[in-house]
């Protein structure tokens, strides 16, 4: 049975509280989202029948600024999942120091089963359903699993039709032509690379000869693979939902990406071998987790041989598995830090929308690199101060920042 995502998020908060002893009134408020909306979205399908999809929007905490968080289209979306993700978004925004809170949304759907017209009607229907809760100064959505700039464009257009005016700051991850930001498409992976690079330095891992395995070859995982390959790392194994390919001499990531585009999967890639075993069994120095929540569990955590794990996905390690990794002295760069590059550039996008002036790609990456490297260093300092692991260092930094904002607002 899959672990309950929100229960796992609460256990992480409980661990933080034991370290820093939050004021009781603050801790109590941080145990639940401010609000969660459940909506029914009727969509006229291509066969003229009406199908009703269930969607959610969770607004966790806005002490530091407007709620911020993606919208995912996935069959496993649940109320518990969006609550957990909205909590993690709260910490994620705080850990990199941006003035935003945490939110998250999702629709229970397999978008691969929809035509483009059905997908557009669902996207617009979702925005109509949550319209009253979102806005550039209240709650700012973004792309997530199985959503992309095209879908964000549809949602922005639907919102603006209702509002009767242009509101580009309503949503981030938009196409460049309607107010998106340069580098946004690969910002999660780029931010992940900057913190991975800092961790490699701290752990004195030698780039030459080190091997990397990547679980998940979607947008974040594929972009991370491409960045790491350009930086001289050897990627020996990659997996997606259909299989795993392995080459101890290193996979050609460009050709693997082309293969996936053609075949819709990475299996049977000519430049590697299909692996029967799980990717966690691979002999790799660094493991990148870029799939879904709860990928690492008590059932498979002992298979991991890596010295360093980077959580590019949200919540990929269950709390029980995390304790085992910590006891084995395996360093984990936690999701709230490792994948915060996406929300960081979303914040940059909001800033550009607000004053209608757009940055070059070089400026975006320069600002992102500075933010991510500095945030890693502050998390490491907290880790050392509390003699904890890096996850707790990041959580302490973020929770302290949120708690201070709540206190200064008089919420205590």
Image: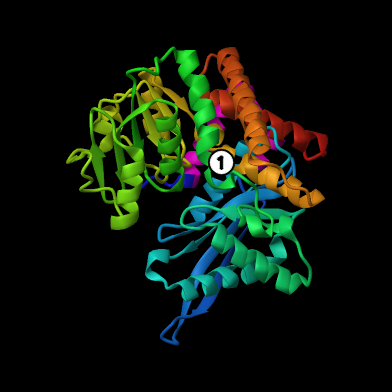
Q: Is residue 28 magenta?
A: yes
Q: Is residue 371 left or right of residue 236?
A: right
Is 235 drawn above or below residue 346 in the view shown?
A: above
Is 170 drawn above or below residue 391 in the view shown?
A: below
Marker count (numbered): 1
The spot of residue 251 in percent (x, y) is 29, 35
Q: Nearer the viewer, residue 76 or 97?
A: 97
Q: Which of 366 and 291 is in front in this view?
A: 366
Q: In which quarter of the image is the C terminus?
A: top right
Image point (67%, 51%), residue name: 34
Q: Is residue 272 left or right of residue 83?
A: left
Q: Is residue 103 magenta?
A: no
Please rate how many residues cluster around mark 1, counting C-alpha atoms within 10 Å: few if below 14, some from 14 to 19, many from 20: many
The spot of residue 397 in percent (x, y) is 64, 26
The spot of residue 266 in percent (x, y) is 28, 48
Q: What element carries label 1?
A: helix
Q: Is residue 15 left or right of residue 329?
A: right
- Is there any visible trace of residue 234 in the rendered image? yes
- Chief SS of the magenta region: helix
Chosen colour scheme: rainbow
Q: Quadrant of residue 302?
A: top left
Which range of residues does the magenta coloring cover?
Answer: 6-30
The spot of residue 287 in percent (x, y) is 36, 30
Furthest toward the bottom, the residue is 48
- Is there any visible trace of residue 101 in the rendered image? no
Q: In which quarter of the image is residue 244?
A: top left
Q: Nearer the viewer, residue 145 or 117?
A: 117
Image point (35%, 19%), residue name: 328
Q: Which of 398 and 68 is in front in this view?
A: 68
Q: Name the residue under label 1.
A: 187
Q: In this view, does 402 lie to the left or right of 253?
A: right
């Amino acid at each position: 049975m899959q672990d309950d995502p929100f229960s796992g998020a609460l256990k992480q908060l409980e661990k933080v509280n034991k370290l820093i002893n939050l004021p009781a009134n603050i801790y109590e408020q941080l145990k639940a989202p401010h609000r969660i909306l459940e909506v029914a979205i009727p969509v006229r399908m291509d066969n003229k029948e009406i199908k009703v999809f269930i969607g959610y929007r969770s607004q966790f905490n806005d002490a530091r600024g407007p709620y911020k968080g993606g919208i995912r289209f996935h069959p496993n979306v649940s109320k518990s999942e969006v609550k957990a993700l909205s909590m993690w978004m709260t910490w994620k925004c705080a850990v990199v120091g941006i003035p935003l809170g945490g939110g998250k949304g999702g629709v229970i759907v397999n978008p691969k089963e929809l035509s483009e017209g059905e997908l557009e009607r669902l996207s617009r229907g979702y925005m109509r359903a949550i319209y009253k809760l979102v806005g550039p100064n209240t709650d700012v959505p973004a792309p997530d699993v199985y959503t992309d700039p095209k879908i964000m464009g549809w949602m922005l257009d639907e919102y603006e039709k209702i509002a009767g005016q242009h509101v580009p700051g309503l949503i981030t991850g938009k196409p460049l032509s309607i107010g998106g930001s340069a580098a946004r498409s690969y910002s999660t992976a780029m931010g992940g690379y900057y913190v991975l690079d800092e961790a490699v330095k701290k752990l004195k891992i030698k780039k030459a000869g080190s091997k990397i395995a990547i679980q998940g070859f979607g947008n974040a995982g594929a972009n991370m693979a491409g960045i790491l390959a350009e930086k001289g790392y050897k990627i020996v194994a990659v997996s997606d939902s259909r299989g795993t390919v392995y080459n101890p001499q290193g996979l050609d990531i460009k050709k693997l990406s082309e293969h996936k585009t053609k075949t819709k999967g990475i299996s049977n890639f000519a430049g590697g071998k299909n692996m029967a075993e799980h990717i966690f069994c691979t002999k790799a120095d660094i493991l990148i987790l870029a799939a879904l929540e709860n990928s690492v569990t008590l059932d498979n955590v002992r298979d991991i041989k890596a010295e360093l794990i980077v959580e590019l996905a949200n919540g990929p390690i269950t709390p029980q598995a995390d304790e085992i990794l910590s006891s084995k002295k395996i360093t984990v760069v936690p999701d709230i830090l490792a994948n915060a590059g996406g929300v960081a550039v979303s914040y940059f996008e909001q800033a550009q929308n607000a004053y209608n002036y757009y940055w070059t790609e070089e400026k975006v990456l320069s600002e992102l690199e500075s933010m991510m490297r500095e945030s890693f260093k502050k998390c490491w300092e907290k880790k050392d101060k509390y003699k904890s692991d890096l996850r707790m260092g990041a959580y302490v930094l973020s929770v302290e920042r949120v708690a201070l904002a709540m206190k200064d607002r008089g919420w205590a």
